[in-house]
Image (spheres, rainbow, N blue to C red):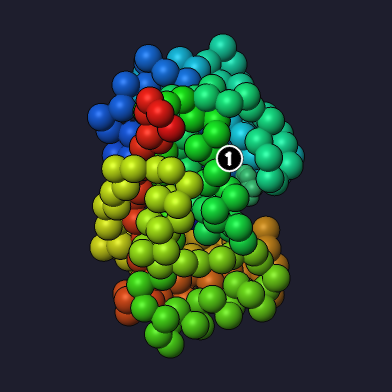
Amino acid sequence: MEMVYGRGYLSAGGDAEVAGIVDGFDLKAGRVLDLGCGLGGASVTMARDLGATDVVGFDIDEEVLARASLLVEENQLEDRIQLVHGVPGVLQFVDESFDLVYLTAVACHMSDLGGFFEEIVRVLKPDGWLAGSDWMVREKNQEFRVWDDLLRDRGLNFYFVDQLEFSRVLKSVGFQQIRFNDRTAAFTRFSAASSLRVAQELKPLLLSSLGDEGYQAFKQWTDVRYSGLKNNGMSYQQLYAQKSGAGY
Ligand SMILES: C[S@@+](CC[C@H](N)C(=O)[O-])C[C@H]1O[C@@H](n2cnc3c(N)ncnc32)[C@H](O)[C@@H]1O
């Protein structure tokens, strides 16, 4: 994934996409939770390039956190980023302890989106923000079904919902000021470029690390994703929501 998305990332867009998502938030002033931080790319760019002084990167996967830890060390950001391992469900953070929860390409893995967002609301301070991005169903058309089936057949835990449902669930747990910013066009371009790189430039490297079968499976996934985006099966949205303040 890092070969395709860049060092530190399990989702597309890299440092520039992170900067776009948090643009307008004063990261110096508050405590940030990078929920589902994966390989740590977003935590590192927030602390190294965007002024964040207190970031907690949380993930349920010890292997990705070990790799995130190397990235934090290489950037000498141990004093600004704390990496925390936990289990799905109740987060081991106290109530009202974060100003911003940053979340990219994680909500799509939740079978209980409401329970997941309830935990985010709990750990956010009053008036705190959720900011991030995720995959959302555009139309349940043929291209969407091919994409969804492929992931399901591979035993991967994806639970895609559309923007309306996403918004409804955010509202139901007490978020307000819910806003989306459609990044589908940009992600379609990323996706087209990734498909091409996987077929050409990255092929020898991917073949040697994944083997022939693994490479074919990975290539099929990148092609299906491109087709799903291009043909309106799926969208990619930045999302923002604020926890209600006084009286929540
Ligand atoms: C597609 S990756 C995205 C990683 C990172 N946010 C990025 O954009 O590069 C999804 C991440 O969510 C993590 N994850 C899955 N379920 C989770 C949960 N319940 N709580 C926290 N992280 C979770 C996975 O371990 C994985 O690292």
Q: Is residue 169 left or right of residue 23?
A: right
In this view, 164 is above or below 68:
below
Q: Is residue 20 visible?
A: yes
Please, which residue is most extreme toward the top here?
Answer: 79
Residue at far front of view: 247
Image point 48% across, 43% down: which residue? 103
Residue 182 is situated, as x and y percent measured from the top left of the image, at 27, 57
Residue 212 x/y as whole percent: 67, 73
Tell me the SS state at disc 1: helix
Q: Position of residue 68 (x, y in %)?
A: 61, 34
Q: Residue at x 25, y 29 (%)?
A: 24
Q: Which residue is mark 1?
A: 119
Q: Residue at x 42, y 18 (%)?
A: 30
Number of numbered callouts drawn: 1
| Quadrant of the image containing the C terminus | top left
Image quarter for residue 36? top right
* Image quadrant in which you'd find residue 192: bottom left
